[in-house]
Image (cartoon, grey):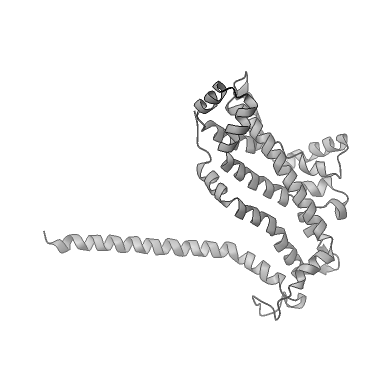
């Protein structure tokens, strides 16, 4: 058989692969543009003068770049206070979630006690209950504790969830039991095994949980809206953004400037924990022994 008979199908297959690769890249670029375009519009609007936000025809940038919009966003409302409140609540809530979830996940994964698996199934079933259903009983509990309009009411009610426990349990199950047994033979107790052996091995999972938890606390709107009365003093960032919409109209350039500011902490956290985040997502969900 002539050699060119084999070359033609090979060339056609390479051409088909290149075509599929180009099409897939174009599709990815279109999807990325669809996701990025609102962010670009938000940033560009935050730098426009107020009278050019809805100018016709629309333009990406205004006649001047008004960087002072960011300063005016802090002066229009006590937005700096809202940022500090949201950051403090998100950090404290993330710490509580990491501590509670890691300890409970270790107990469900590595410790042997009666009724462990049954209780874990019940604990896991709470994930099917939407937050809106729990708002009223949670508010009644906060009122009974005297925590209405307080920072602890923003932190503790949603700190003990099954999501973090389930995810960390899956990581703990991937750790060979021989490591734990060898540490116990060396005289390490349960607390030392947990803090010095188990926790360092699940750092990627802790990073993933920290990012998810911080974002959930930072973006929470419904619960702070219900539990906080002293808005000017204890409001978080989502409530603060809502205050920009007033009866006298909305200054959209200031709203967009405040929105860009509100994205800074979560963006910085993602950049800092990017290495652990990618590793944790890549290995999450693996079963163990």
Residue 217: give x, y in percent of width and height: 72, 47
Name the residue located 65 percent from the left edge and 69 percent from the top edge: 41
Name the residue located 77 percent from the left edge and 59 percent from the top edge: 241
Outermost residue, top side: 114
Residue 136: give x, y in percent of width and height: 80, 39
Name the residue located 81 percent from the left edge and 60 percent from the top edge: 79
Name the residue located 84 percent from the left edge and 60 percent from the top edge: 78
Q: Quadrant of residue 18?
A: bottom left
Placement of the N terminus among the 4 image quadrants = bottom left
| Closer-to-camera residue (62/181) | 181
Q: Is residue 78 visible?
A: yes
| Closer-to-camera residue (5/186) | 186
Vertical comparison of 60 with 204: above or below: below
Q: Is residue 125 visible?
A: no
Outermost residue, left side: 1
Vertical comparison of 167 with 257: above or below: above
Q: Tell me how many marks there are.
A: 0
Q: Position of 148 compared to 177: left or right? A: right
Outermost residue, front side: 186
Q: Position of 163 compared to 2: left or right? A: right
Residue 214: give x, y in percent of width and height: 68, 48
Q: Quadrant of residue 48?
A: bottom right
| Closer-to-camera residue (131/255) | 255
């Amino acid at each position: 058989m002539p050699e060119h008979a084999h070359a033609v199908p090979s060339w056609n297959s390479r051409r088909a692969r290149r075509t599929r690769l180009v099409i897939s890249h174009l599709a990815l670029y279109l999807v990325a543009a669809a996701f990025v375009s609102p962010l670009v519009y938000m940033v560009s609007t935050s730098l426009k003068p107020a009278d050019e936000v809805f100018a016709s025809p629309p333009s990406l940038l205004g006649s001047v770049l008004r960087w002072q919009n960011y300063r005016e966003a802090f002066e229009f409302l006590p937005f700096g206070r809202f940022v500090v409140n949201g950051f403090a609540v998100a950090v404290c809530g993330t710490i509580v979630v990491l501590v509670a979830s890691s300890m409970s996940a270790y107990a469900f994964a590595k410790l042997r006690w009666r009724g462990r698996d049954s209780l874990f199934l019940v604990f896991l079933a709470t994930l099917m209950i939407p937050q809106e259903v729990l708002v009223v009983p949670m508010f009644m509990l906060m009122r009974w504790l005297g925590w209405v309009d307080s920072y602890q009411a923003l932190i503790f009610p949603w700190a003990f969830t099954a999501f973090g426990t389930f995810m960390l349990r899956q990581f703990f199950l991937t750790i060979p039991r021989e490591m734990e047994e060898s540490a116990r033979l060396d005289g390490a107790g349960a607390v030392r095994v947990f803090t010095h052996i188990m926790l360092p091995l699940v750092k990627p999972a802790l990073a993933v949980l920290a990012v998810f938890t911080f974002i959930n606390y930072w973006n929470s709107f419904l619960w702070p809206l219900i539990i906080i009365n002293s808005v000017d003093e204890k409001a978080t960032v989502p409530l603060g953004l809502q205050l920009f919409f007033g009866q006298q109209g909305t200054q959209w350039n200031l709203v967009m400037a405040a929105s860009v500011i509100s994205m800074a902490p979560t963006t910085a956290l993602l950049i800092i924990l990017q290495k652990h985040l990618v590793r944790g997502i890549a290995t999450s969900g693996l079963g163990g022994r």
